[in-house]
Amino acid sequence: MTDEQHDPEDEQRDSEDEQHDSDFENWAKKCKLNLNSPTTSQLYEYRMLTVQEYISRFRRGNIKAVLPNTAKSMTVEEALRQGKVEKVDIRKLMIQKRKKFQK
């Protein structure tokens, strides 16, 4: 293929990548997250998991001690958009990898 010829599959992949990037950026802004953070990318990828599933997979177990029961069944996306559940900052629990969480 010469420089002037274009592969339609490449163009479609580029278009899909741009759409994904745009969706990700919009989502991160709505959830007030850092676009450049690897944690934000992970949260975006697993946003449909429940908070309990996400924390079990990717965060320390001691977070469960301060996690309100109502937040456990929420999706990651719902919890991030809500921010605080029963006066607990769910966003902070899901974003930061702190060793100690207190009620």
Image (cartoon, rainbow, N blue to C red):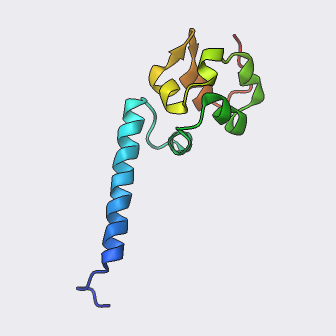
Task: Name the residue: 33% across, 68% down.
Answer: 12
Total marks drawn? 0
Horizontal and vertical percent for residue 85?
Answer: 55, 14
**45 left or right, relative to 9:** right
Looking at this rendering, what residue extends furthest in the front direction?
73
User: Is 20 left, or right, of 75 in this rendering?
Assistant: left
Looking at the image, residue 57 sits to the left or right of residue 46; the answer is: right
Q: Nearer the viewer, residue 26 or 92?
A: 26
The residue under the point 57% across, 21% down is: 90
Image quadrant assignment for residue 54: top right
Q: Quadrant of the C terminus?
A: top right
Vertical position of residue 43 compared to residue 12: above or below: above
Residue 36 drawn at (x, y percent): 46, 44
Which is nearer the eye, 11 or 3? 11
Q: Residue furthest bottom?
A: 1
Q: x and y percent of residue 63 in the render?
A: 71, 23
Q: Residue at x 50, y 42 (%)?
A: 44
Q: Position of residue 40 (x, y in %)?
A: 51, 39
- At 33% from the left and 53% from the top, the residue drawn is 19
The answer to whether residue 102 shows anywhere in this view is yes
Please state, as top left, top right, bottom left or bottom right, where the N terminus lies in the image: bottom left
> Is residue 100 among the parts visible in the rendering?
no
